[in-house]
Amino acid sequence: MSDAMMTDLTTRAVVAALDGTAMQQRLAANNLANLETPGYRAHHADFEDRLRQALRAERRGDGRADLDELSPHVRATADPPRPDDNNVSIESEMTGLAEATTRYEILTRLLDRRFAMIGVAIGDGRAG
């Protein structure tokens, strides 16, 4: 993506949210892949609060690098382990994966519409 298209706050925020959501999807898939691995601890990515903080800093004018360099915080869950010391919950992971997939689809549609709006603006408001 060109730097010019990535300079506006909305686009940069959506791209950061897409990155965080993709990380959530990867972690959920990895957790599910390790469902039967003794001693495995499930991991989740937290990025929503960090994204909000970066957006606030950006609006105040002191945080462009915060948004551009935002990365999800990955943490092991504190869920109680099963007897094999694995704490992956298939129900929790499937729910999280479904939520992340839906969020990702919505964000990609939003980004697509954003680029369509930019295209219309560049074309002086004429479609096609």
Image (cartoon, helix red, strand yellow):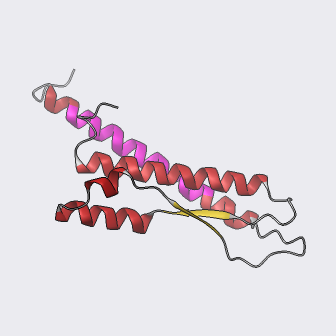
Choose top left, top right, bottom left or bottom right for residue 48. bottom left
Q: Is 108 included in the stretch rendered in magenta?
A: yes
List x then y, in percent, for residue 76: 66, 68
User: What secondary structure predominates along the stretch shown in magenta?
Assistant: helix
List x then y, in percent, for residue 49: 41, 69
At horizontal 48% and vertical 54% (from top left) the residue drawn is 20
Q: State the residue in front, 119 or 81.
A: 81
Q: State the residue in front, 64 or 114.
A: 64
List x then y, in percent, for residue 111: 34, 42
At horizontal 66% and vertical 56% (from top left) the residue drawn is 28
At horizontal 47% and vertical 49% (from top left) the residue drawn is 19
Choose top left, top right, bottom left or bottom right for residue 35. bottom right
Choose top left, top right, bottom left or bottom right for residue 98. bottom right
Where the C terminus falls, by quadrant?
top left
The residue range painted magenta reads: 97-118
At horizontal 79% and vertical 63% (from top left) the residue drawn is 40
Instruction: Locate residue 56 relative to residue 35 in the image: left or right.
Output: left
Above or below, 37 against 114 in this view is below
